[in-house]
Image (cartoon, coloured by chain):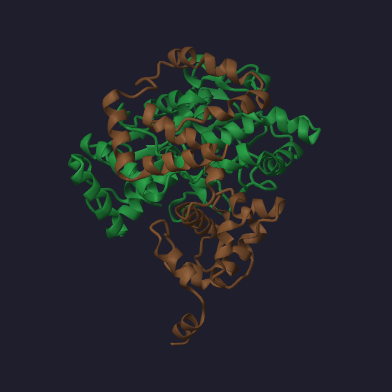
Amino acid sequence: MTSKQNIDDSPIDFAEQIIRDVKNSKEDGVLKCVQCGMCTSTCPAARHSDYNPRDIIERVLDGDVSILDDDLIWNCFYCYTCHSVCPVGNSVCEVNQILKQIAISNEKGYDKLYEYMGFADSYFTAAIGAIPEIFFDDIDRDVPGWRDFRNSLGEIREELELDPPLMPSKEVIDEVSKILTITGFKAKIEKIRASQEVEK
Amino acid sequence: MKSIPDKDILLFRSCLVSVEYPGVEASTKFVFDKLGIDYAISDKQTCCTGLGHYSDVFDQVDTSAIGARNFRIAKDLNRPNLVMMCATCYAINKKSVKLLNKKDDLRDHINRLFEDNDLEHLKYEKDDLKPTENIFHVVDILYNKISEIPDHIKYDLSEYKIASHHGCHYCKVHYEDTIAGFRDPNIIDELIEACGCKTIGWYDHKRATCGTGFRQRYSNPDLSFTATADKMNALCDEEVEIVVHLCPNCHIQFDRYQPLISKREGREFKAIHLNIAQFIAIAMGGDFDKVIGVKAHTTPIDSVIKELKEVSK
């Protein structure tokens, strides 16, 4: 009864929205947070930036939806270290992912997704999650010989006698494209792209 | 320990392995063949969506719908045991199986979309696959055969200083299924020991992320490379020569970006980076070009492994 009383007294609609989210695998773990800070003490983003997973859960339990606009939520590495050490079975890493999906469904964070549209495009053209070409110049600057390596990938794969080939059949690509159209993914991607290209 | 199959396996192709370190696939096949593992690869299987999923572009419905299609392919081939070369494919697929079994609304929603769009053949029925019984990483399959590995070892790599880096998405996401520890991860260390070598064991930041952080590497490189430097500095302090991985994304972060992080830190990091399947394949006599795929590596493998010494019988 005590815990029910506490739940009724707290502004937990926001936390309940997260608990109901399809991605949540920790049931009501978020409500069990005791603010011990184990997540923050082991978090690589907290070590090197102002990102603070303990604070994220505090704000969620306070019903502070302004967190959806906070750039810091985009610093999570998705390394699941917090998830693996939480003594009450909460997962800030999952909560963070859900917060971002809520933000995106409210048309927030589109600028953060825009550079990653290549991950979507490659599914419709090759049914594969290729590194977006928009990053190729950065990779070539930072990784010695990377573009030469990529240009010789076919020969390297041939020497390794890898089969089947990289590119799936048209039938496979069409089926995957159809799935990503009926889930609403394609429409979402077009909307994100249109919003950013208008701003430019 | 959980029950681990050695047959009816669909070896799940990985986008990063395919285009960055194809030698990981060739080495996995080489080692699986030596150990008598029954596996096949399908040209119909597609990526797990992991890179896009963890860049927040794909939501759970998109990812689980693509997962359902791949799970149907495995079932239709009578190869219900999915075995992943990439830690992210492993975590993504295990989560999709868990959610599709447990969350009726998600499963019904995806199945209805399939039914309404002439894709009935892809429908996923509850418990078609089981997360613990059917979803594995290559290291699980190798660990199940750990007592047989020494029988196939041709070369002695014990003179090198070796450390392991355990991918977060193998160890920490579905930690209830992780073999040989997730707080003090050791599955790679134990597999290396089966090759007649010793690793350095625990080191500072051993269980920490590689620093990739999906979008962090590209959108937030200072944050990403600073986190990687924690680990590279710790490995350099221990004078490690070979770092052994289980995930192609970690592999990229360490192998491809080691020269850049060396410059940033003002310290020469010289370790080479191998996937555990590549390490075992070298020890079992795999050819450097035809099996290990060394030409795909940024840090040259022969900068450390200059010659191979046969094990004394």
Residue B246 in sight from this viewpoint: no
Chain that is brown in the image:
A
Asked if residue A30 is positioned above or below residue A186 in the image, the reply reads below
Determine whether A70 is above or below A159 in the image: below
- Residue at the spot x=51%, y=49% of the render? B171
Q: Position of residue A162 (x, y in %)?
A: 40, 19
Specify whether residue A109 is in view: yes
Question: Residue B159: x, y in percent?
Answer: 66, 28
Q: Residue furthest front?
A: A198
Indicate left or right for B132 with A29 as reference.
left
Between A66 and A76, the one lying in front of the other is A66
* Image mark count: 0
Q: Judging from the image, what is the letter of the chain drawn in green? A: B
- Please state which of residues B51 and B247 is positioned toward the viewer in this rendering: B51
Q: Is residue A5 above or below residue B62?
A: below
Q: Residue at position x 52%, y 69% from top?
A: A88
Residue B292 shown left or right of residue A24 in the figure: right
Question: In this view of the protein, which residue sits in the foreground, B308 or A122?
Answer: A122
Q: From this viewpoint, which residue is outermost toward the right?
A: B266
- Residues B219 and B135: in front is B219
Q: Position of residue B67 (x, y in %)?
A: 33, 43
Q: Quadrant of residue B210?
A: top right
Residue at 74 percent across and 34 percent down: it is B239
The residue at the point 32 percent across, 34 percent down is A177
Q: Quadrant of residue B8?
A: top left
Residue B297: x percent and y percent? 59, 22
